[in-house]
Image (cartoon, rainbow, N blue to C red):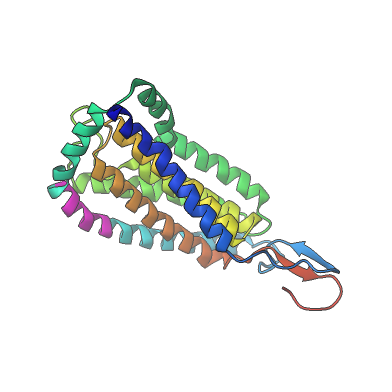
Amino acid sequence: MTRYLAVLIWPVGLAVIFAAAWLLARRAPAEPDRGPGSTLRRGTHRAAGADSAEEAVMGGIKLAFIAGVGTVAAFGVMCLLGLLVVYHGLAIDRPVLHWVTGHQVHAMAALMNRLTKIGDTWTAWGAAAAAAVCLAGTWRTKRWVPPVALASAIFLDHYATQALRHVFHRFGPPTSPLGTYPSGGVDRCIVFYGLIAYLLWREFSGQQRTAIWAGAVVAALGFNEAYSRVYLSLHWFTDALSGLVYGILLLAAFVVAVRSVAGRTAAVGVVPVAGGSLA
């Protein structure tokens, strides 16, 4: 029975994430009252007209610059964390590796082999490219924001991660020596799927409850990727944890960058049809 202890971590972890989301969503403020004579309107804080080509270029440069500054800051934090992980992480990593490999179940390993592909480079980049095209057509204003944000994420995440690999020449577990610090698969799950979720949320919802559930889905994807990489011995345990930290830092940088050019997100509100004020 002890063989299944490692298997149980996965469903228990997912259950904890969604249970926490449910509790937070229950405490979140309710949607605005929709009184008589009112109608819903998305993004009432945004300008009605489309940006000119010059405004789009300057806005794109601003977004990429802010995201780049945030990426540099994240790189610095990961360099400091890397000193701890690379030089002292094996004290944790080796016992975890031995325990996991001694408790592997074939059916679970087969499942994880499929699920871990969610964080593969071309899978994440493909999702980002598809989302960029779709969101560019569905955003009502500043349609250049999603493509610029997601393209910048691909570029900055890739080269910042490569730079970290050059700084820290760390080998992965014996079965996967190329799995290095930090876990790129975990990082990509947080950055790309998190950014896609944020772009969808700010255009089509803006509600706090929706944000909580979207965050829970992204957290579940990140947890699944970290778990699968460790379960399959593709990464050291501390590399997977570092990937989570790295992804969160990068995602925060891109959220700030998007907000800097697209403004704050207004929840779905009430626009009076005849008189009154905006709810």
Residue 164, compared with residue 114, is above or below; it is: below
Look at the magenta stretch and give its main secondary structure. helix
| Most foreground residue, 192 or 22 | 22
Does residue 59 show up? Answer: yes
- Is residue 72 located in the magenta-colored stretch of the structure? no
* 258, above or below 115, in the image: below
User: Closest to the observer: 57 or 66?
Assistant: 66
Q: Residue at image x 58%, y 59%?
A: 26
Q: Position of residue 152 (x, y in %)?
A: 45, 51
Residue 14, given in percent of the width and then of the height, sits at 44, 43
Image quarter for residue 74?
bottom left
- The image quarter containing residue 91 is top left
Q: What quarter of the picture does the C terminus occupy?
A: bottom right
Residue located at (59% from left, 55% from top): 210
- Residue 145 in view, yes or no: no
The residue stretch that appears in magenta: 76-86
Determine whether, in the image, residue 1 is placed left or right of residue 167: right
* Nearer the observer, 197 or 97: 97
Q: Is residue 79 magenta?
A: yes
The residue sitting at the front extreme is 1
For image coordinates 42% across by 48% down, the residue present is: 190
Q: Is residue 73 left or right of residue 273?
A: left
**Residue 163: percent from left, percent from top:** 26, 48
**Residue appearing at x 20%, y 52% in the figure:** 82
Instruction: Give residue 170's quadrant in the image.
Output: top left
Q: Nearer the viewer, residue 78 or 150?
A: 78
Q: Residue furthest top?
A: 106
Quadrant showing the N terminus? top left
Q: Position of residue 220 (x, y in %)?
A: 45, 44
Number of numbered tags placed on the structure image: 0
